[in-house]
Image (cartoon, helix red, strand yellow):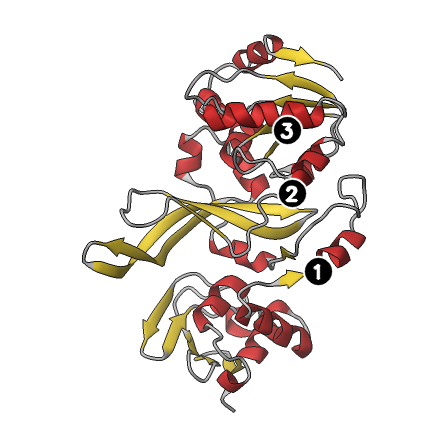
């Protein structure tokens, strides 16, 4: 059976990468050659050399050692799910976004950090198998002052050699790009990631997000910080990683200077919020916005970041932790 009639426009490469977490893929005509992801048979402990293929047109999988079947069979067996769930996963991939109704998702959440009255949009939910593509220690993060322990906790790593479109004066072409990847979780569910390129590749964006990235619906590292009464809020995930490496676990990021209503509501649940935004014009405006929105709900602390600085660059190079404590002792505090 030609499965493309069922899954019209299904991208076989994305099935391998985004659903099954396959790494390097070699294209040979209609065949995508890759390591076998099946968790049984000769490759249950991994496949050191590419011995499997998925046809882009017929969507049929074959492993020279383990056998094969349709792409439905492949997803079903790799993820250990039912045939119906495998079909649903593939149909969601065709729709370019694997989403669940956030109302259904929130119903299963516990705690006060998500209100049923908040106006959430649909949030994408990804399988943890995607993490196998990049999860490892990263020299770039280490050089920025992020400890290996924090890298393991936050499940960061590098997505190497992924083909991206490069725009040049002569036109567009495919080039391999290495990116450090920062996964984003909501109540233990992988809801997306931010990827920063590691080298200066002209014509390729510095940052890429996963499809439908829910920037304003949650706070980076909130899963690990919600147990605290007091919280620090910064702009970037990199600042979170650096400060966590310095022993500051009760810290979250807003993914930029724009702070959305949902994020404001989440911050209002803490007894004290210390604002530590970047030292530029957008960061100053974000600080004023947070003060205005939070001052009637919680105690506030404001750390005055020097001009053109940000928490990650200020504290990224290992120095005694007392330097950070000095910053906290001297920041302006106001109470509600």
Q: Residue 301, relative to residue 127: is it above or below?
A: above
Residue 120 position in % (x across, y down): 69, 50
Inter-mark Cα distance, 2 to 1:
15 Å
Q: Please tell me whether mark 2 sits on a helix, a strand or a loop.
A: loop
Residue 301 position in % (x across, y down): 65, 17
Mark in front: 2 vs 3: 2
Q: Please tell me whether mark 3 sits on a helix, a strand or a loop.
A: loop
| Point 58% across, 79% down: residue | 72
Visible residue check, residue 179: yes
Inter-mark Cα distance, 1 to 3:
30 Å
Q: Residue 242, relative to residue 80: is it above or below?
A: above
Q: How many marks?
A: 3
Q: Is residue 135 left or right of residue 293?
A: left
Q: Quadrant of the C terminus?
A: top right
Mark in front: 1 vs 3: 1
To which quarter of the image does residue 216 belong? top right
Residue picked out by circle 2: 218
| Point 67% across, 73% down: residue | 85
| Point 62% across, 38% down: residue | 221
The residue most toward the bottom is 1
Q: Compare marks 2 and 3 and give the one earlier in the sequence.
A: 2
Crowd around label 2: few <14 · some 14–19 · many ≥20 (10 Å): many
Q: Please tell me whether mark 1 sits on a helix, a strand or a loop.
A: loop
Q: Compare marks 2 and 1 and give the one earlier in the sequence.
A: 1
Q: Residue 175, relative to residue 40: is it above or below?
A: above
Inter-mark Cα distance, 2 to 3:
17 Å
Q: Which mark is residue 249?
A: 3
Crowd around label 1: few <14 · some 14–19 · many ≥20 (10 Å): few
Residue 40 position in % (x across, y down): 57, 72
Residue 63 position in % (x across, y down): 46, 78
Residue picked out by circle 1: 101
Crowd around label 3: few <14 · some 14–19 · many ≥20 (10 Å): some
């Amino acid at each position: 059976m030609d499965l493309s009639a069922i899954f019209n426009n299904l991208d076989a490469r994305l099935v391998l990468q985004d659903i099954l977490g396959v790494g390097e893929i070699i294209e040979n005509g209609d065949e995508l050659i890759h390591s076998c992801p099946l968790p049984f048979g000769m490759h249950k402990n991994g496949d050191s050399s590419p011995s499997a293929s998925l046809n882009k047109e017929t969507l049929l999988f074959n492993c020279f050692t383990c056998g094969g079947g349709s792409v439905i069979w492949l997803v079903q067996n790799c993820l250990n799910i039912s045939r119906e769930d495998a079909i649903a996963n593939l149909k969601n991939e065709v729709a370019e976004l694997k989403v669940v109704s956030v109302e259904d998702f929130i119903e299963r959440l516990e705690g006060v950090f998500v209100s049923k009255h908040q106006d959430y949009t649909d949030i994408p939910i990804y399988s943890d198998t995607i993490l196998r593509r990049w999860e490892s220690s990263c020299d770039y993060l280490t050089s920025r002052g992020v400890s290996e322990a924090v890298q393991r906790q936050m499940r960061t790593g590098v997505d190497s050699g992924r083909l991206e479109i490069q725009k040049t004066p002569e036109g567009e072409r495919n080039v391999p790009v290495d990116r450090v990847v920062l996964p984003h979780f909501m109540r233990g569910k992988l809801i997306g990631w931010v990827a920063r390129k590691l080298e200066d590749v002209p014509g390729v964006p510095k940052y890429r997000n996963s499809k439908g990235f829910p920037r304003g619906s949650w706070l980076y590292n909130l899963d690990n910080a919600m147990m605290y009464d007091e919280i620090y809020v910064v702009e970037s995930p990199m600042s979170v990683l650096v400060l966590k490496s310095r022993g500051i676990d009760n810290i979250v990021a807003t993914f930029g200077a724009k702070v959305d209503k949902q994020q404001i509501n989440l911050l209002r649940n803490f007894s004290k919020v210390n604002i530590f935004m970047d030292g530029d014009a957008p960061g100053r405006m974000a600080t004023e916005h947070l003060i205005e929105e939070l001052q009637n709900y919680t105690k506030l602390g404001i750390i005055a970041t020097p001009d053109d600085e940000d928490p990650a660059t200020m504290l990224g190079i290992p120095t005694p932790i007392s330097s950070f404590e000095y910053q906290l002792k001297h920041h302006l505090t106001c109470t509600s």
